[in-house]
Amino acid sequence: MQMIEINRAVSIQRHELRFEASTSSGPGGQHVNRSRTRVTLVFDVGASTSLSPDQKRRVRTKLSTRIDREGRIRVRCGRHRSQAMNREETIRRLAALIRGALRHVRRRVATRPSTPQRKRRMKDKRKRAEIKRGRRAPSADSD
């Protein structure tokens, strides 16, 4: 059974992917009109045995705009003239989507500016204010 590697920890079994072929759009004459080179990859997140329930939940939340009502992700590619190349491209795109959805974003730990940093900032602010004050037109009551 062939596996599609998402990251070091996660792989999807190839039999969980369904491929649909159709004719591509755009210019190309007879070849593009007669050949079913555009590939649509369909991956059912809910029915997948490769993803844990937690991973499925993460994929559903992060890719909610890409998932249809039945819980399937569709990836379409018609860039290449060859159906095989389009199939490989859809697999790469799906892997990138799922990899991004499973990535853990580390929360930034809030820190406070140190005392020397605060003093330097205030000194720079005063200096900047003085420069701007020097640019002002002299007021009438300063005679």
Image (tube, grey):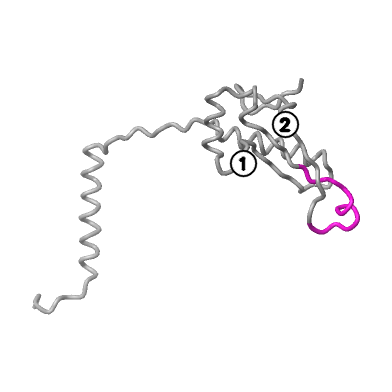
Residue in front for this viewpoint, 105 or 114: 105
- Residue position for label 2: 17
The residues colored magenta run 26-39
Tell me the quarter of the picture where residue 6 sits: top right
Q: Secondary structure at mark 2?
A: strand
**Is residue 37 highlighted in magenta?**
yes
Q: Which mark is residue 91?
A: none
Residue in front for this viewpoint, 5 or 35: 35
Q: Amino acid at mark 1?
A: Asp
Q: Residue at x 60, y 24 (%)?
A: 51
| Residue 43 vertical position relative to residue 124 in the rendered view, above or below | above
- Image spot of residue 14 (x, y percent): 74, 27
| Residue 62 vertical position relative to residue 55 in the rendered view, above or below | below
- Residue position for label 1: 68
- Image spot of residue 108 (x, y percent): 38, 34
Along the polypeptide, which appears first: circle 2 or circle 1? 2
